[in-house]
């Protein structure tokens, strides 16, 4: 992937989406040795309402570090979907949490959805790993890094006591997304 | 044998800039005697000042001397002391420099209880700029910018220092020459922030506007207004009005000193790191 | 194998300071620079250094200068409002010739401005903010990796020239995370200040017989001396003697070797008809734009000052000779353009792209401007 690829994680503060963005950037830049630039909502924007974390990915050094046309956008709240899906590139992808985004925005992009947070809660007993589950889904969806690279980056960041939980969440997100894609 | 001040004075730097009748020279001599008593090594002593008449003192003495910007002595000294905690760091300056423009640095240096000795030469006026009122000019007094009498209330430097957390606070006057070096010596030996306020007269800028006919009148005032703290027991605020309470007003050996605290913090950080 | 990490620009700056030998940081909390203080509050004590959060911006600068006088490499970090407050003591460090490094993660202004928005509005405040004539060195990195190397260079320049050296960054490069390959020990040059070689009795802190940058002794060592913010003679004591004041003022201005300090990146400049002069994050938009323009057959290129002050006027003048236009995108209302125009001196037309709404200048803005200029000029 020589070309520039842009991924946006959006939702509300506390959903761990900034961390998800950082882990993805680490999978790209550190595990796979390619290039990534991660940035996020900052200041008042980061505290209230919709917030976002963006990762620009390339095989070459990245010049402009902010999003220009987003290839893939994850939206974990209705507000985020409304606010941030607008600049998805033609033919891009929007992934939403089907419980939280009741009215997914329409556009010239593909839309996938599943109950991301509920899946984490029901199958892993912990809502807190929904971000890693979502990351697994995004990696399955985009294949911007290999499944293994993503897992390595997740494990590198997870605290010792939570490595297994995060590993499971990542795998669950990845497999749920792949199943969803083959069903479509 | 008389005391050899020359040993500590920089050759060729006198005469000083202070006016005839100014008490700053008396304070300078007191400081030199105190340094001598404490047997401080010249290379291991720094004298840091701000801007103003009093702040010209460092230029005359043979130590590491820093004539900083207006009000900033305590902040410069904080950096120097933290960089070299074994260095003896003494601040000198006037009232306006110390507690007006430098007030924030002054109170926070007190709060930290960093091991500095700060000699505030309080002559109740901005002398160098021509006699404008300072936070220590008495209410009602005349200055070049209070032609109708000073409307401002007065800062009590010693109380300010105590309230802010200094652990050694003393006051004397330029008249009480022997007490000056005694208190400065105690201040230098004290581990923690030591404030020594030395009330002084400024005949040129304060005295002549406020009915002091001559410099000696100002000295007489300092002599008469002074009252040792030991003698103030039972006296009311009203009794003490216009008095200059002298001696050691506050001493607390229990509060930790800042550089020592920081050294402990470093140990904690390094244990965590290792 | 070299250590690689994905870190924020501010953290790269803090880590680089330690690499450069910085052992003292004083600061005051201010967005968007605070991460530098946060990282150093953790790292410095671990290696025997000192971090102090001072009571205000001025106090932080004072403590830094004090620590540097005692021989430590010292740094402060701030943003525009803090820069305004520190100007007094930036001047002091210039006059007393005390090395230190000041990071400024710029925000808009005047006054409180937009604390969380990216900006490049302190170019002139950095150069001329403090009163009086003085030399200024400012470096302006554009990536995490470069923030690291330029921070190290900033310390080297401060120690070499006995000056406060500014690191100018914007919120975007300060906060974004990028991969950085940490240089190994010895990989980047780390310079220390020259120490006096004369016997203590002969030492003068501004002795021009040792060149335009005389050695600076650490206070508390075997050398005793006096420093002041007043105009001073070679011995450090105040003077009003006309000849001495004049000589010292001129030496202080002359002492920075402009050619040695200069550092530019030139991107596709050889055949460029349209020269973009930009720095910081804007240069990344420019590079993106240039690549797109080149794909359309438009010969655009970039001159990127990495040393922003002294401004690379001579190089700008050279490249302007063969250019159809020089275009200056900057996140302010026209600061660097003045320096560029002065250098270009009418050799070709100049154009500004200005933005102060808290959003970065996009590649598209630059592309649009070049395309317009191409048709107009």
Image (cartoon, rainbow, N blue to C red):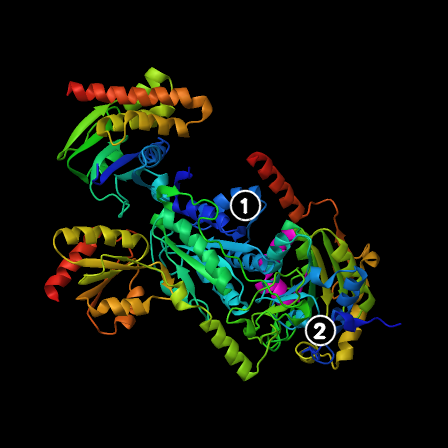
- Residue sitting nearer the eye, C210 or A115: C210
User: Which chain is mark 1 on?
Assistant: C
Q: Residue lying farthest top?
A: A123
Callout 1 crowding tier (Cα within 10 Å): few <14, some 14–19, many ≥20? many
Q: Quadrant of the N terminus of chain C?
A: top left
- Residue sitting nearer the eye, B100 or B177: B177
**Residue C73 occupies which quadrant of the picture?**
bottom right
- Real-space Cα separation, disc 1 to disc 2, in angstroms: 38 Å
Q: Position of residue C187 (x, y in %)?
A: 44, 48
B55 part of magenta stretch: no
Q: Position of residue C53 (x, y in %)?
A: 54, 50
* Residue segment shown in magenta: B90-111
Q: Residue lying farthest bottom?
A: C242
Residue located beneath label 2 in the image: B10
Res. C116 visible in picture: no
Q: Is residue C8 above or below residue A131?
A: below
Q: Quadrant of the C terminus of chain C?
A: bottom left
B93 part of magenta stretch: yes
In this rendering, would A52 be left or right of A2? Answer: right
Q: Position of residue A138 (x, y in %)?
A: 26, 28
**Residue A98 occupies which quadrant of the picture?**
top left
- Residue sitting nearer the eye, C279 or B230: C279
- Residue sitting nearer the eye, A139 or B182: A139
Q: Position of residue C130 (x, y in %)?
A: 46, 68
**Residue C110 occupies which quadrant of the picture?**
bottom left
Residue C44: which disc?
Answer: 1
User: Which chain is mark 2 on?
Assistant: B
Residue drawn at x 66%, y 50% is B113
């Amino acid at each position: 992937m020589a070309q520039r690829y842009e991924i946006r994680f959006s939702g509300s503060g506390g959903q761990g989406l900034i961390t998800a963005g950082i882990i993805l950037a680490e999978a790209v830049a550190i595990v796979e040795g390619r290039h990534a630039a991660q940035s996020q909502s900052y200041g008042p924007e980061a505290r209230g309402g919709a917030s976002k974390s963006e990762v620009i990915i390339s095989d070459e050094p990245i010049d402009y570090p902010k999003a220009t046309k987003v290839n893939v956008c994850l939206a974990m709240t209705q507000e985020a979907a409304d606010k941030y899906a607008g600049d998805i590139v033609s033919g891009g992808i929007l992934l939403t949490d089907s419980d939280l985004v009741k009215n997914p925005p329409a556009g010239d992009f593909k839309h996938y959805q599943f109950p991301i947070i509920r899946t984490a809660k029901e199958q892993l007993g912990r809502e807190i790993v929904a971000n890693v589950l979502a990351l697994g889904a995004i990696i399955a969806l985009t294949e911007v890094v290999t499944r293994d690279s993503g897992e390595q980056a997740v494990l590198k960041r997870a605290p010792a006591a939570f490595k297994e939980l995060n590993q499971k969440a990542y795998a669950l997100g990845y497999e749920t997304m792949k199943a969803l894609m083959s069903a479509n | 044998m008389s005391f050899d001040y020359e040993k500590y004075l920089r050759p060729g730097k006198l005469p000083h800039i202070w006016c005839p009748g100014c008490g700053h020279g008396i304070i300078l001599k007191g400081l030199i005697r105190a340094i001598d008593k404490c047997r401080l090594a010249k290379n291991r002593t720094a004298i840091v000042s701000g801007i103003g008449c009093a702040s010209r003192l460092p230029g005359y003495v043979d130590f590491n001397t820093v004539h900083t910007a207006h009000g900033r002595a305590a902040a410069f000294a904080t950096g120097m002391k933290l960089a070299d905690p074994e260095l003896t760091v003494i601040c000198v300056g006037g009232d306006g420099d110390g507690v007006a423009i430098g007030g924030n640095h002054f109170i926070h240096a007190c709060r930290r209880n960093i091991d500095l000795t700060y000699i505030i030469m309080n002559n109740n006026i901005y002398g160098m700029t021509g006699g404008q009122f300072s936070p220590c000019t008495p209410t009602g007094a005349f200055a070049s910018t209070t032609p109708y009498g000073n409307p401002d209330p007065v800062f009590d430097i010693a109380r300010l220092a105590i309230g802010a957390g200094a652990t050694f606070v003393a006051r004397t006057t330029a008249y009480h020459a022997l007490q000056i070096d005694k208190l400065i010596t105690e201040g230098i030996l004290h581990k923690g922030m030591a404030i020594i306020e030395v009330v002084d007269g400024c005949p040129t800028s304060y005295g002549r506007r406020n009915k002091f006919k001559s410099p000696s009148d100002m000295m007489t005032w300092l002599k008469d207004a002074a009252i040792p703290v030991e003698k103030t027991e039972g006296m009311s605020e009203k009794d003490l009005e216009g008095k200059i309470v002298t001696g050691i007003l506050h001493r607390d050996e229990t509060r930790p000193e800042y550089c020592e605290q920081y050294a402990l913090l470093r140990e904690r950080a390094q244990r965590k790191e290792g | 194998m070299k250590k690689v990490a994905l870190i924020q620009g501010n953290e790269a700056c803090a880590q680089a300071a330690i690499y450069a030998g910085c052992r003292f940081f004083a600061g005051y909390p201010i967005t968007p620079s605070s991460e530098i203080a946060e990282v150093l509050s953790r790292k410095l004590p671990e290696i025997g250094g000192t971090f102090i959060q001072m009571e205000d911006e001025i106090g932080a600068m004072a403590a830094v200068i004090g620590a540097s006088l005692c021989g430590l490499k010292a740094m402060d970090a701030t943003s525009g409002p803090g820069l305004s407050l520190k100007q007094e003591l930036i001047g002091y460090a210039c006059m007393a010739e005390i090395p230190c490094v000041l990071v400024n993660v710029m925000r808009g202004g005047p006054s409180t401005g937009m604390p969380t928005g990216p900006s490049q509005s302190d170019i002139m405040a950095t150069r001329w903010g403090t009163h009086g004539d003085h030399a200024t060195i400012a470096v302006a990195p554009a990536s995490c990796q470069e923030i690291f190397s330029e921070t190290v260079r900033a310390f080297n320049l401060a120690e070499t020239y006995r000056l406060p050296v500014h690191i100018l960054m914007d919120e975007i490069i300060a906060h974004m995370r990028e991969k950085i390959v940490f240089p190994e020990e010895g990989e980047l040059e780390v310079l220390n200040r020259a120490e006096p070689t004369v016997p203590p009795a002969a030492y003068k802190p501004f002795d021009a017989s040792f060149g335009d940058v005389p050695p600076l002794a650490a206070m508390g060592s075997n050398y005793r001396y006096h420093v002041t913010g007043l105009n001073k003679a070679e011995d450090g004591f105040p003077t009003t003697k006309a000849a001495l004041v004049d000589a010292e003022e001129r030496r202080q201005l002359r002492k920075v070797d402009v050619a040695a300090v200069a550092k530019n990146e030139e991107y596709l400049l050889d055949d460029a008809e349209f020269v973009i002069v930009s720095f910081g994050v804007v240069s990344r938009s420019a590079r993106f734009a240039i690549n797109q323009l080149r794909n359309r057959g438009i010969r655009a290129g970039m001159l990127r000052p990495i040393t922003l002050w002294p401004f690379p006027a001579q190089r700008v003048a050279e490249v302007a000779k063969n250019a159809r236009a020089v275009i200056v995108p900057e996140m302010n209302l026209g600061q660097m353009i003045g320096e560029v125009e002065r250098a270009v001196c009418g050799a070709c037309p100049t154009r500004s792209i200005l933005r102060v709404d808290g959003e970065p200048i996009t590649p598209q803005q630059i592309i649009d401007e070049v395309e317009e200029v191409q048709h107009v000029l």
